[in-house]
Image (cartoon, rainbow, N blue to C red):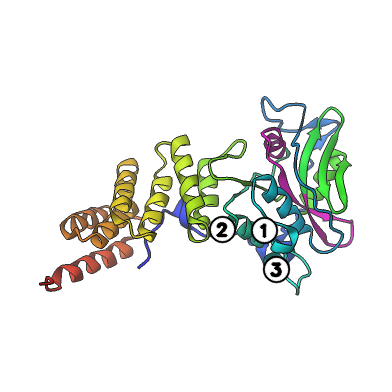
């Protein structure tokens, strides 16, 4: 039996780009975001310059720019790893490169939140100013589709420069416009790898929780810490409550799962999914009367998954019909 998750956090990441090498969704002709020495749509309060110090460097001139870039940001975040350890899970031999989806998956397995930022230079620079190195996907060359991962570690708006860990260059300095053109060619895709409890700059609640949800199955303790931190930041986040309930259910702590799902019911009235999960936890805990009451409420609401609620109701009735153990 699988518990229902809220749609916002429970759906698997669906990056359309993950179907081709490095998952790139190219955007030729994308409008520049830096023009005439000025950052367009500059966020309020953004410093003119910033740099992240202490980011490791793993030089690479092969097809391992993905593992090298990921090793740099993971090690910066406190994970004991290396390019050699990451390569087997990240290199797709038939494609001679690394898929975006695999970069995110390896980050989650390492117990780090893989948060994909908005495709905006302003948000990229905000994360640098907040102390988060950013993995970016670039399209290099004019005629050839050469995809490349690098790590942005600094920028200077006044000098029109951006600094990257890239290939064999510890501190590759490009003009912001040149970088943006290559980044736009890669769909302006980028992410930060963060320890649970550390938030990206300009964190969006549902985007953050979508990044945490896939960790439930591969790094449950890190997911628990991230959900708990999210709940401290957004106290009414029913999605975080549901995530904590899912994790408690998975470790067979049905009383705690029921408590978390009950919190989600109170925080998100009018949705049947928290009530369905509450009913499932109560059923697993042997509280049939309370489980029946919860699922009846879910059925009365009837959305968004009435068929699921009907099946849960049938489970409860079958359990109630079994002879009591002597």
Earlier-in-chain disc, 2 versus 3: 2
The residue range painted magenta reads 122-150
Query: Alpha carbon of mark 1 to alpha carbon of mark 2: how far?
Result: 13 Å
Earlier-in-chain disc, 3 versus 1: 3
Asked if 289 appears above or below 233 in the picture, the reply is below
Please report contact status of discs 1 and 2: CB closer than 8 Å, yes or no. Answer: no
- The residue at which mark 1 appears reads as 103
Going by the image, does 173 lie left or right of 20?
A: right
Q: Quadrant of the C terminus?
A: bottom left
Label drawn at residue 13: 2
* Viewer-nearest of discs 2 and 3: 3
Tell me where residue 103 appears, x and y as whole percent.
Answer: 67, 58
Q: Is residue 133 magenta?
A: yes
Tell me where residue 268 appears, x and y as whole percent.
Answer: 34, 44
Going by the image, does 191 lie left or right of 232?
A: right
Q: Does dot 1 land on a helix, a strand or a loop? A: helix
Q: Does dot 3 land on a helix, a strand or a loop? A: helix
Please report contact status of discs 2 and 3: CB closer than 8 Å, yes or no. Answer: no
- The residue at which mark 3 appears reads as 88
Earlier-in-chain disc, 1 versus 2: 2
Tell me where residue 142 appears, x and y as whole percent.
Answer: 89, 56
Front in this rendered view, residue 50 or 270: 50
Going by the image, does 182 lie left or right of 122?
A: right
User: Can residue 187 be seen?
Assistant: no
In the displayed image of the protein, which residue is found farthest to the top?
Answer: 45
Tell me where residue 322 appears, x and y as whole percent.
Answer: 15, 73
User: Can residue 37 be seen?
Assistant: yes
């Amino acid at each position: 039996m699988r518990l229902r998750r809220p749609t916002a956090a429970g759906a698997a990441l669906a990056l359309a780009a993950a179907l081709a090498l490095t998952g790139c969704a190219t955007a030729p002709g994308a409008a520049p975001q830096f023009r005439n020495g000025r950052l367009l749509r500059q966020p309020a309060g953004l410093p003119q310059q910033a740099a992240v110090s202490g980011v490791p460097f793993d030089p690479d001139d092969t097809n391992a720019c993905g593992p090298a870039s990921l090793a740099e940001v993971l090690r910066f975040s406190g994970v004991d790893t290396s390019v050699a350890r990451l390569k087997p899970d990240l290199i797709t031999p038939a494609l001679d490169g690394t898929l975006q989806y695999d970069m995110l998956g390896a980050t989650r397995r390492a117990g780090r939140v893989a948060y994909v930022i908005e495709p905006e230079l302003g948000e990229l620079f905000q994360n640098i100013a907040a102390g988060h190195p950013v993995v970016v996907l670039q399209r290099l060359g004019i005629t050839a589709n050469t995809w490349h991962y690098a790590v942005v570690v600094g920028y200077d708006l006044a000098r029109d420069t951006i600094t990257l860990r890239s290939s064999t260059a510890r501190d590759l300095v490009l003009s912001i416009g040149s970088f943006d053109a290559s980044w736009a060619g890669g769909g302006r895709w980028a992410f930060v790898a963060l320890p649970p409890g550390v938030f990206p700059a300009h964190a969006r609640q549902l985007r953050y929780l979508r990044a945490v949800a896939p960790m439930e199955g591969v790094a449950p303790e890190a997911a628990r810490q991230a959900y708990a931190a999210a709940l401290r930041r957004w106290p009414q986040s029913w999605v975080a409550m549901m995530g904590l309930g899912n994790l408690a259910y998975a470790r067979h702590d049905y009383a705690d799962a029921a408590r978390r799902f009950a919190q989600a019911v109170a925080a998100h009235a009018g949705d049947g999914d928290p009530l369905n999960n509450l009913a499932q936890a109560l059923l697993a805990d042997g509280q049939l009367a309370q489980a029946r009451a919860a699922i009846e409420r879910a059925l009365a609401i009837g959305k968004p998954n009435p068929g699921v609620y009907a099946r849960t109701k049938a489970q409860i009735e079958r359990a109630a019909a079994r002879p009591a153990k002597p």
